[in-house]
Structure formats: C-alpha cells, structure tokens
Amino acid sequence: MSLIPPSLIPPGAIDCDVHPAVPDLRALFPYLNNHWRDQVVQRGMGDLETISYPPNAPLSARSDWRPASGKPASSVAQMREHILDPWQIRTAILNPLYGVHLLFSEDMAAAFTSALNDWVRHEWLDRDERLRASIVVPLQNVDMAVAEIERCASDRRFVQVLVMALGETPLGRRHFWPIYAAAARHGLPLGIHPGSSYRHPVTPTGWPSYFTEDYAAQSLALQNQLTSLITEGVFQKFPDLTVVLLESGFTWLPGYLWRLTKFWRGLRLEVPWVNVSPTELVRERVRFTLQPLDAPPTAADLEALLRHVDSDKMLLFSSDYPHWQFDGDEAIPAGLPAQSLQRILVDNPMDTYPRLGEP
Amino acid sequence: MSRHVVSSVDDFPPGTRRLITVKGRPIVVFNIEGEYFALLNRCPHQQASLFHGTLTGLVASSEPGCYKFEREGEILRCPWHGWEFDIRTGQSYCDPSKIQAKSYKIEIEDGASVVKGPYIAETFSIVVEENYVVLEL
Ligand code: FES
C-alpha cells in the first residue's frame, strides 16, 4: 500500500471545518432588533470571547494568518487569501465559534444566535459561493433551537447544525431530541465542536489550572458526548441523522471503541435499544474531521491506526483555519493511504453533507 | 458420535442444572420447565464456567425508553463479564454469527431403548419403566 508524504492539498478539496470570527458584538448590530442593540450598549457589552480559543494563544491562529489589526479570519478577504484561493478549495464549511453559547438568558441567546447566523449568511455566504455554513443553535432552550433550524434550513447553503461539546447536560438526553428531529428532517448532520458554555468544569475531575489541560480535555468531552448519543439511543431514534465530530481528533477511536463495545457486550441490557455494537454504529453514522491530527510518530503507524478503525469512510478533510494545526500548506498528514485521499477530500464530505451535492 | 445417559428424568427436576463430564469435556445441562439444554461449560469469551451463570430473559427494545422482557429464563448470562447466550442455540447476543457457546443435543429416551443400547451409562443402572436424559456427543 502506498502511503503519501505530508503534502499540499490537491485542488477541489472540501474543507469541512473553518472558523469565521465575528469582529465584535457591534458587527451583529445589523441583525439585532433595536431592543437587543440597546441592551448591548446599555450593558456595555463589547464582545463574547471565550477561553476556549484565547485570542493571543498561538493555537488560536497561525502567525502568518494573523492580520495587522483585528481578529484572524474575520473577513472573507482573509479567508480567500489564506486558504480558498491558494488551495483552490471547492467548498469550505464555516463553523462559527462565537460565544453565544455562554449566555444565560434564553432570549438573549436566541437573539444573538439568530444574528450570528444572519451575519454568516450576509457577510460570508453571499460574498463567496465556495462557502457553506453550519446553523448555530441556542441550546439554552430547545424550542428556540428548533425554531432557529426551521428559520435557517430553507437556505440550502446551511449544511449542518452546530453545537459545542460542553454544555449543561449530555447531548444524548431526550430533551434535546426535537433538535435532532429537526436536523434529520432537513438533511442536516449534527456537528459537535470543542467549546464550552462553562456551566461545569471542562474536565471531569474539576477545573484545571492551564490552557494545555483545557484544550487536551476537549477530546474527552467529545468522547463523552459520543457515548451519550450512542447509549441514549439517538442513532436508533433518528436513523437518518449523521453526527460529525469536529476537531476531536480520531486516533483515540480504537481504544475508545474497544472499551465501549466491551462494556456494551456485558451491560447492553441497560440500553436494549442499542442493538448493534458501538463500533458498528460509529463506523456507519459518525464522521470525524482530519485536523488536528494527534498523529503517531511515523506514517506507517498512522496507516496501521486507520486499519484498526477499519474504514476510510469516516474521515473528512479539514484545515481548521485559522487555528494553528500545521505549517505551510501541508494540511494532508503523512501516512494516509494514497487511495483514500480522494475519499477524505471529496467523497466522504459529499456523502456526509447531502446539501453539498445540490446545484 | 455416541450417546451418554446424563440422568433419569425423575432425578433431574425443572429449575436445576448439572455439571457433567463427557469424553473429558465439562458440560452443563439445564432443565428449564421440562426442557433440557446442554452447553460446553466454557464461555467462548474467556472460559468462565457457564454452570455459574444466571438464567434471565432477553431485554428487547423497539426504541429508546421501551423495554420488553422476553423469553424469560432462556438467556444465560456469563458470570464473569455478563455476555448473554441463547440457551437454545448457544448464540451470543453481542455477536451471534461469530461468538457462540458450544451446545449439544439432548434427548429424552425411555428405559427400554436405553437398555437396548448402544448407550454409555456406566454410572447408572437403567430401569425400563423410567425415562432418561441422553446427550449426544
Ligand atoms: S468469560 Fe464469559 S463473558 Fe467473559
């Protein structure tokens, strides 16, 4: 089997995870009504920054992608110059990580989230036809989240529903199900991205001291959410729903699935609706973006790991722009089997996001 | 193949199980409401003694939140890691096509035919009027 060296992105790739930055709350003014605009002014709100991606942390943006002033990736022009044009990207999916999930007020969360989606639509989707986007939903209130999906889904450039990995309760719980029903009804996968509304510590053991711990813990949160979706029966209840784990890494999959499947074998009578093994469910129904890759030391090791996972259908190409996950243009890590490349770059994203196939 | 007399029916009442050795193999025989089933006494996972397993039912479900307790008493749960086996076939629930407990055929024969042979019943004296639990191996 031929393994590729780290390489440039061939033209025509579909980038499934890029992050447009809202410059500040005022950028959302055109999409907020006068009450909420006034609230921003009266309350002296400036921005909704989270500590998930502190603006000055090197990880939050590659140095060559930082503009002289303002936030990285805060305009279509920057994104074009840095990735869309040089890499000849066919389609890039925008996943805004703006801190609307931090808000406690359900009404404010719904208003700001709608404004965020409208901002994406007008300031990004309307300006470059290579762009698609996720619908951000206010998980603070399930009815409002469903309403937001219904409001945005008719714009076929929205291709996914986006939620953060750490919220108030595990994502498999039944009170969230109307959101999944709406997503499935509209052919929108559920994308889960690192990020927290900080209702709980970001690790299961309590609050960590350092950013390193916080960031490393995010993939555990995604694993926990995956377990919750599996055990609570979301995949059985919504047979048309695909779940995409964004920026989660995937090299943890063999150990994770081995353990979860082991426990399922002995304890499945607790969750009798899980009538196929978690390993099989994940292979069929869950997709993972490529970057950041917690790559093993050698190309052969990565190839071996992909063999353990036993599928080249699960990976979706992503650059994670503007987060700093690799240097130069070498977004394709060494060790991917050459014959899988087309799948990862194009075929898998097309299969995962049915709306990408629409004219 | 030879046929081995396990017990007389009268000595092996419903709700009991027996551990026997046939041709050097440990075999557990169950009487479930008058029906007899035999499995090799080694779990296909890591060889636990199935004789020590629990007989339970099959928890089935058509959707999350729905629990149907079916086939009560016909599912054997291994004492070590809880894998479930169908007492009738030995098939595991978790991976039925690949993981099976070895099962053996049991028949009830009357004493007259047992006496005729060719049965292996070294430890019994056969009474024509009784019925016997016979295992084929
Ligand atoms: S030995 Fe029987 S389940 Fe492990």
Image: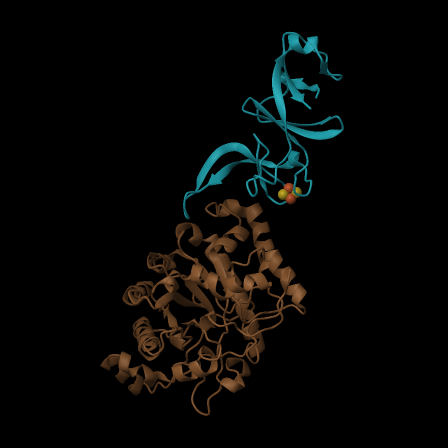
Quadrant in which residue A155 is drawn: bottom left
Q: Is residue A181 above or below residue A95?
A: above
Q: Is residue A56 visible?
A: no
Q: Which quadrant of the figure contains the C terminus of chain A?
A: bottom left
* Residue depicted at 56% across the width and 43% down the height: B94
Q: Is residue B112 left or right of residue A204?
A: right
Task: Give the x, y percent position of residue A246.
Answer: 48, 67
Percent position of residue A269, x then y: 51, 44
Q: Position of residue A333 (x, y in %)?
A: 59, 71
Q: Is residue A57 above or below residue B79?
A: below
**Tint applied to chain A in the drawing:** brown
Ligand 1 sits in quadrant: top right
Q: Nearer the viewer, residue A11 or B28?
A: A11
Considering the image in quadrants, where does the N terminus of chain A appear? Answer: bottom right
Chain B display color: cyan
Q: Is residue B45 visible?
A: yes
Q: How many marks?
A: 0
Decide if residue A177 is on the left or right side of residue B89.
Answer: left
Depicted A161 relative to depicted A174: above or below: below
Q: In the picture provided, is B88 more to the left or to the right than A114?
A: right
